[in-house]
Amino acid sequence: MKILHIITSLELGGAEKLLLDLIPAQKRKEAEVELLVLDMKGEKFLQEYEKRGIKVHITKTNNKFSFKNIFEISKVLKNGKFDIVHAHLIHAQIWTSLTKISNKKIKYITTEHSTHNRRREKTIYKILDKFIYNSFHKVIAISEPTARELIKWTGMSFKKIEVIPNGVSLRTFMGKPKERKNNSLIMVSRFHSSKDHLTVVRALEKLPKEYTLTFVGEGETEEIIKREVLMLKLEDRVQFLGYSNSVSALLKRADIAIQSSNFEGFGLTALEAMASGTPIIASNVEGLSDIVLHGGLLFKVGDVNDLVQKIISLEDKELYFEKSKSGIQKSLLYSIETTSKKYLELYNEELGCSSY
């Protein structure tokens, strides 16, 4: 079986991080897997793909908005003789769906990675999204809430959707149950409207001065958060690390991980924190709450006082150790090997082949 994953970009995000582990896991199952990227601006993962021996195609246009992507994708498909084409994120989904007419022997798959996006705030995009998603042979949703919201938006049949949860490389992130050492907080997340860094900063202001906070990630809302830190005079207690390829080590070193989100399809960074043994406190939103439930603590979205209370509660040594241990146990349900196996089984069903 030969698979081509197509993604909009290699910026810092959950879909991009998922593929970084998923593609090597699929290759270990003796599948031939390659990646096509439409737009390399702001890329963070290319070197990592090269280190892992993944062949990466890059479009000449290097522009996710260009209609020429249709021809770029078609050219790669023609030369590669792929059995499966798997698109991720909206621009890749749009241009990939328009190549289906001339590649009838290929099975087209896409993954929906979020419960919400800006297009769903405008009814005009509903018609476009109905066309895009229905053009694929199968749509994978990364969680039950993601599937429900997509069905609600597009009206597509539930039979067309397969729920396959994301997974992480447990070999990379797996830690041991630990005891609390100090008061270091960490949030690993891109700065984006889907995330709620402001609530975390405002919670820090209400916490004792011994508490410190590290943000790992980059993005469009970063300057807004930096201004808030300055206004609250927290610059001595907040560190902005930017992008890091040492997330596993940073999570294991921190005492408490926070995932503050306005909406999430899944919550990959929360899962990574849980696997590392660092207790996680996350927003109680669909998708994310399913992952953290019974493995960490949940707080009401945007509720500073609730977040502060949950952070303070982990000063209890017994509760802290319990959440460290339960997080690890919950993370074992979401290995990248399991995710890879389910993807390959779905591919084989679409191709009418026996399962791997």
Image (tube, rainbow, N blue to C red):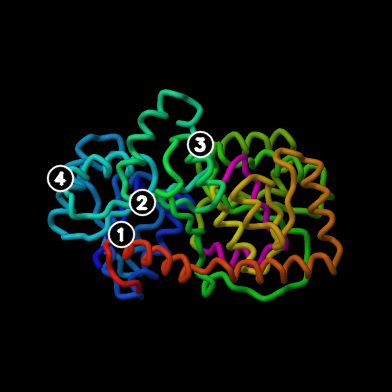
**182 to 115, vertically: above or below:** below
Mark 1 highlights which residue?
350
Is residue 78 part of the magenta span, yes or no?
A: no
How many angstroms separate mark 1 from mark 3 (CA)? Answer: 25 Å
Mark 2 highlights which residue?
138
Is residue 133 visible in the rendered image? The answer is yes
Q: Residue at x 80, y 44 (%)?
A: 306
How many angstroms separate mark 1 from mark 2 (CA)? Answer: 8 Å
Q: Residue at x 73, y 73 (%)?
A: 178
Asked whether the residues under the numbered discs 1 and 2 touch, taking CB atoms below 8 Å apart as contact, a structural biologist would say: yes
- Disc 3 crowd rating (10 Å Cα; few below 14, some 14-19, many 20+) is few
Mark 3 vs 4, N-terminal side:
4
How many angstroms separate mark 2 from mark 4 (CA)? Answer: 18 Å
Residue 314: image tag: none
How many angstroms separate mark 3 from mark 4 (CA)? Answer: 30 Å
- Disc 1 crowd rating (10 Å Cα; few below 14, some 14-19, many 20+) is some
Task: Indicate the amino acid at tag 1.
Answer: Glu
**253 to 38, vertically: above or below:** below
Mark 4 highlights which residue?
102
Asked whether the residues under the numbered discs 1 and 4 touch, taking CB atoms below 8 Å apart as contact, a structural biologist would say: no
- Disc 4 crowd rating (10 Å Cα; few below 14, some 14-19, many 20+) is few
Mark 3 highlights which residue?
152
How many angstroms separate mark 1 from mark 4 (CA)? Answer: 18 Å
Magenta residues (range): 246-264
